[in-house]
Amino acid sequence: MRVALQVTCVNDAMFPDTGKAVVRLLRRLGVDVDFPRAQTCCGQPMVNTGYLDEAVPVVRTFVDAFAGYDAIVTPSGSCAGSARHQHSIVAERSGDAVLQAAVAETGPRTYELSEFLVDVLGVTDVGAYFPHRVTYHPTCHSLRMLGVGDRPQRLLEAVRGLTLVDLPHATECCGFGGTFALKNADTSVAMGADKARHVRDTGAEVLVAGDNSCLMHIGGMLSRQRAGVRVMHLAEILASTEETEGESDGPVVGERAGDLA
Amino acid sequence: MTSARDEILRRVRSALDGVSPAVAVPPAPRAPDRGDLVALFVERVEDYRAEVTRCTPAELDGLVAEVLNGAQAVVPPGLGLDVAGSVVDHGLTSIELDGIDAVVTRAAVGIAETGTIVLDHQPDQGRRVISLVPDLHVCIVDSSQVVADVPDAIALLDPARPLTWISGPSATSDIELDRVEGVHGPRTLHVVVVA
Amino acid sequence: MSGTFVGMPAFPTAARAALGNTQLRRNLAHATHTIRDKRAQVVGEVEEWEALRLAGAGVKEAALRDLATHLETLEESLIRAGAVVHWARDAEEACEIVAQVAKSHQVDEVVKVKSMATLEIGLNDHLEREGIAAWETDLAELIVQLGDDLPSHILVPAIHRNRAEIREIFRTRMAASGRPAPDDLSDDPAALAGAAREHMREKFLRAKVAVSGANFAVADTGTLVVVESEGNGRMCLTLPEVLISVVGIEKVVATWSDLDPMLRLLPRSSTGERMNPYTSTWSGVHPGDGPQEVHVVLLDNGRTRALADDVGRQALRCIRCSACLNVCPVYERTGGHAYGSVYPGPIGAILNPLLKGVSDEQTASLPYASSLCGACFEVCPVRIDIPSVLVDQRAAVVDSHRDDRRPKAEAVAMKAAAWAFSDSRRLAWAERASGLAGRVMSRFSRTTLPGGRAAAGRLPGPAAGWTGARDLPAPPEESFRAWWDRTDGGQFGEGR
């Protein structure tokens, strides 16, 4: 099976450790994952802001980059949702029949990470070790657009050492919403404040989710509040083992400041 | 000048130009068999904080008198029941009705799933206004009139008649979305189920 | 007599003000969570709910797609049943028809059943200008009317008010329009409802003309349906001599049996009840029972504009249950007034631009008043894919500015992003630049995220929208792409 990683533009530019974690995790599970170099972005930032014409070349780049792979795995519910539910809208807008055929064929091969692990590989215990108190936020697009259901929780419950605690009002949106976070910043922050409060109420050390964009928003608020809760992508927890746990003093998002200085 | 009618119909046709009118409408599903319909009906009516009493045909007269407890009632001309001290409606005005405490009617259908009674305002139920203005509505439902769910009721009812579907007493959720019984319609609904 | 939405600012500005209203925030959070839980409970007890939604969506979609036929059938059925049918292209025409009918009976007042269509067309203000008082009889509408306020919710227009505020409105305002509130009025909801009962009853008993809307209009039988709770609807539909119903053309369903899925879907979605207290149906004039002169005004007012929109057409399936408002995280925090329309919340964010177009700034801001979380679609009883229509209406907004002389900064940014995202080499170049910025930030930033990563605190300029309330992680020195190249996908060097 030829498997491609769609790392997503946000992870590529801002959260490379999530991409590395997916590579490490999939290799550990015996999947030889490839990173098609021509990939860029799924086009969602343009589509969700109403720039459909601008999204056409981006979607074209997407389908070209991932042509020929059996499965496209992405550590983002939102980007998987974009490929599966929005690319057809963009392709129709383009009037290009070839592009329409290509997206119809690419969409169903695109899997969010937890879907790929549970449905395609058939595993829930990925051999991870993460001895921390964790709470899980189901991001809206993974929950409602993709319907990943309890797959992420099943994966987390199988992680050795991990204590999973329920997040109150878990299914409520965190308020990120892409450009919504900027265009309606006040409302976005009001939503995020409530989400951050619910996270703090769990007493968890780590907030985990399947989308780094949402985590950047919630984590940015938790950080500003000096809440003492860090955010981590699901892939990074699932990639953790006793070896990696030993070499760091805890989970990190991205590079640690000390490494950069 | 084109009429508003012709203009609107033209706009509708133009809006739907090239749109196929054929839509597959899936049939509405049926609720699963819930067993004893009358028991369910009673339970669901009570859920609305309506009062429900079950009785035999022989007990009906006495029970209605007991429920009214001396309150004066208006009754429809075809009620088929002697209610002591009642006024038979032959065109009472709203103001006259406003001076009467209670109303006794029968019903057309009872719906078990939703705890609803439907009046189709035949002579045993009377004009719509009589079951509206008085503050206590005593509604007699025969157990044979109870059907399982909304589609059964729709199939039995005649749309050419005026219909009033009643599920509990008048209520509102307009204050903090808290349900409060009793606004403009009868504040007390007493359903008598005869079997 | 009542406030106006005219001149409202765009959503972000109106929302900012609303977010600062602590009483509003508290009232809305309480009310929306209460109704959300009630809905979830009664929907949860219907095992075949999804099939019921599909049936409901099918009934409405089928009616819309053959609307001209059904409207003609409805007209015929209504006339046969003794009703007078009027058609109104727009709000002005509809208001004028109602005013003419009322004036022909020499009345100076009408009683009104709560109706979204009559709110939409601004009927009360129009009648007031014609010297006719329009009394709202629904409790929440009464609260709004007495308080010179604006509705903020489809089902519960006074959802933004709590019991203490309502008591104050009744105590100070009722006397000016009829029977005053009792001196010892408490803020107990039952007492407040009781005061409304006393206040309205004299109006019901003397009214000659009533105005209503309709939840459904059945084409083949000419039946109109009003779904309500309090009995004010029954009062208006039964006591007066003349009844005028203003009905949007999208309210049509084809047949009597089509009411089945709708009457099961609406109450559970709306008030969270198995069935609402009262549903009235009538078909024209019923001799000897109820109004003997019945008028029906079939209203377009932008509906045919929405009907022509292949993506947006589904918004006309809406049965005004307001479930989407109750679950919306944006509505829950901003309330309804911020939407600047009688149709607030997610459905308002699509319905207003579909009915009116996106040429004014306020309406054009509405499709963006959503995080696209999809909670609205999940609860919609007629399966309106609101997030997809929101995105499509955003595209309509963007497209309406494509010929602008001076493009907006956002359009320039989006074009630049699209250019970079159309070729991975351009993206890699941009990432190298951001890596440099990240290196600088890491060196000089005094903010670190939990876990230790360098971050930016408050930044000026365009970044303020983000960093006003959230720290921003510094870009990593090396992008994933650069790492993959350097290590051959983690095979060499620092590969973890």
Image: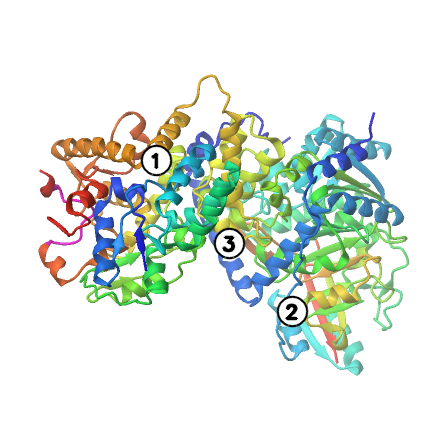
* Mark pair 1, 2: CA separation: 51 Å
Mark 3 touching mark 2, by CB under 8 A?
no
Nearer-the-camera pick, B68 or C330: C330
- Give the side of residue B26 with respect to residue B118, left or right: left
Q: Which residue is mark 1?
A: C421
* Mark pair 3, 2: CA separation: 22 Å
- At a point 63% along the width and 46% down the height, the residue shown is C139
Quadrant location of residue C23?
top left
Residue type for callout 2: Arg
Quadrant location of residue C71?
top right
What secondary structure is found at the residue carrying circle 3? helix
Q: Which residue is mark 2?
A: B30
Q: Which residue is mark 3?
A: C378
Tell me the subunit letter for badge 2: B
Nearer-the-camera pick, C76 or C208: C76
Residue type for callout 3: Glu
Q: Which residues are magenta?
A: A248-257
* Residue C462: image location, x then y, percent: 32, 27
- Give the side of residue A146 with respect to residue C192, left or right: left
- At a point 68% along the width and 30% down the height, the residue shown is C125
Front tag of 1 and 2: 1
> Badge 1, how many Cα within 10 Å: few under 14, some, many 20+?
many
Q: Are marks 3 and 2 on the same chain?
A: no
